[in-house]
Image (spheres, rainbow, N blue to C red):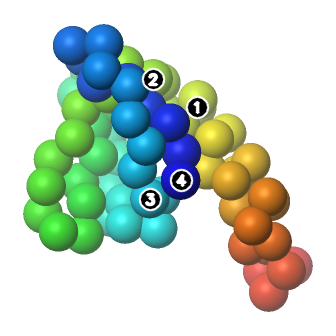
Amino acid sequence: MIQVTRLNGFEYYINPHQIETIEVRPDTTFQMLSGKIIIVKETVDEVVDRIVEYRRRIGGFKNEE
């Protein structure tokens, strides 16, 4: 799980494996596999860094090398 911050300041965690797309509109916007749209304060680069760190922590890159 990665921590993100909604525009109202509420911090919570999402499962990055459930993110279908990430767009900049100009805010960072997730389209989840469920169809739900989530807009967060973090930049795309911050989100990608958190996803990479999360996948390293859980060993997600073992099969991708």
Q: Is 42 positioned to the left or the right of 8 in the image?
A: right
Q: Residue at x 58, y 29 (%)?
A: 46
| Residue 17 in view (yes/no) | yes
The reply to whether dot 4 and dot 2 touch (C-beta < 8 Å) is: no
Comparing labels 4 and 2, the label whose residue is closer to the camera? 4
- The residues tagged by marks 2 and 3 sit, at their Cα atoms, a distance apart of 15 Å
The tag earlier along the polypeptide, 2 or 3, is 3
Question: Residue 42 got which mark?
Answer: 2
Instruction: Write the residue at 75% across / 67% down.
Output: 58
Residue 24 seen: no
Q: Give neighbour class at mark 4: few <14, some 14-19, many 20+ (Cα, 10 Å).
A: few
Q: Earlier in the sequence, mark 4 or mark 2?
A: 4
SS under mark 2: loop
Q: Residue 35 got which mark?
A: none
Question: Amino acid under label 1?
Answer: Asp
Looking at the rendered image, the quarter that the C terminus falls into is bottom right
Q: Label 4, on which residue?
A: 1
**Vertically, is 52 above or below 23?**
below
Residue holding disc 1: 45
Q: Residues within 10 Å of mark 1 (few under 14, many from 20)?
A: few
Q: Gap between marks 1 and 4, in whole Å?
A: 17 Å
Q: Earlier in the sequence, mark 4 or mark 3?
A: 4
Instruction: Give x and y (percent) for residue 15.
Output: 44, 59
Tell me if mark 2 has few (under 14), some (14-19) or many (20+) residues whose alpha carbon lies within 10 angstroms of its own: some
**Residue 2 vertical position relative to residue 10 in the rendered view, above or below:** below
Q: Tell me how far mark 1 sits from mark 3, CA to CA.
A: 17 Å
**The furthest residue to the bottom:** 63
